[in-house]
């Protein structure tokens, strides 16, 4: 007795379309990203930061119509979930610079 495969055809086509779309998105994301790098100087600067948020505009950087704002933040927490302990250390340093063009 032959196995009726015709009722499975719409499901197979939908799954194939979803798989193809997922593959295309994955290829697109990989093509547009770069592997990045780890700079030990930056790692040390992030480790030396104090906890909390800091925003300031350094006076020595404001010259010739240029302004600069620096921001940094760090959060260190220990979270316990279901008997497991997780240590979270999140830090960032940002610079926003505006200069007048010619």
Image (cartoon, rainbow, N blue to C red):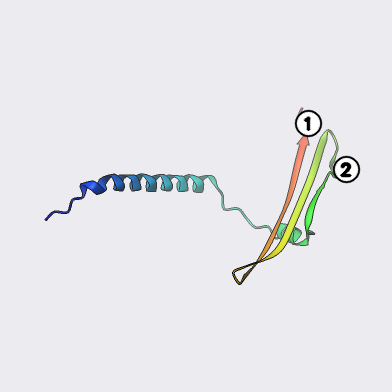
Question: Residue 21, percent across and down?
Answer: 41, 44
Quadrant in which the N terminus is drawn = bottom left
Question: Is residue 95 depicted above or below 87 in this figure?
Answer: above
Pinpoint residue 23: horizontal percent, then vertical percent: 42, 48
Cα distance in 3D space between marks 1 and 2: 17 Å
Dot 2 crowding, Cα within 10 Å, few <14, some 14–19, many 20+: few
Question: Dot 2 lies on which element?
Answer: helix
| For residue 13, side relative to residue 49 (left or right) | left
Q: Secondary structure at mark 1?
A: loop
Above-or-below relation of 78 to 16: below
Closer-to-camera residue (93/33): 93
Position in image of residue 82 (x %, y %): 59, 69
Mark carried by residue 11: none
Q: On the picture, is 58 further left or further right than 16?
A: right
Q: Residue at x 80, y 43 (%)?
A: 69
The single residue placed furthest to the front in the displayed view is 82
Indicate which disc residue 100 carries.
1
Q: Which residue is mark 2?
A: 59
Q: Which residue lies at the image location 46% right of the left edge and 48% below the top edge?
A: 26
81 vs 12, nearest the viewer: 81
Q: Quadrant of residue 91?
A: bottom right
Disc 1 crowd, CA 10 A, few/some/many (<14, 14-19, 20+): few
Q: Give the quarter of the image for residue 60.
A: top right
């Amino acid at each position: 007795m032959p196995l009726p495969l015709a009722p499975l055809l719409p499901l197979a086509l939908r799954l194939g379309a979803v798989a193809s779309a997922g593959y295309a998105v994955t290829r697109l994301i990989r093509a547009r990203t770069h592997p990045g790098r780890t700079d030990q100087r930056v790692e040390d600067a992030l480790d030396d930061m104090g906890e909390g948020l800091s925003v300031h505009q350094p006076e020595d950087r404001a010259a010739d119509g240029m302004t600069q704002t620096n921001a940094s933040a760090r959060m260190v927490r220990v979270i316990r979930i279901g008997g497991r302990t997780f240590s979270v250390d999140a830090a960032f340093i940002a610079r926003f610079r505006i200069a007048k063009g010619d």
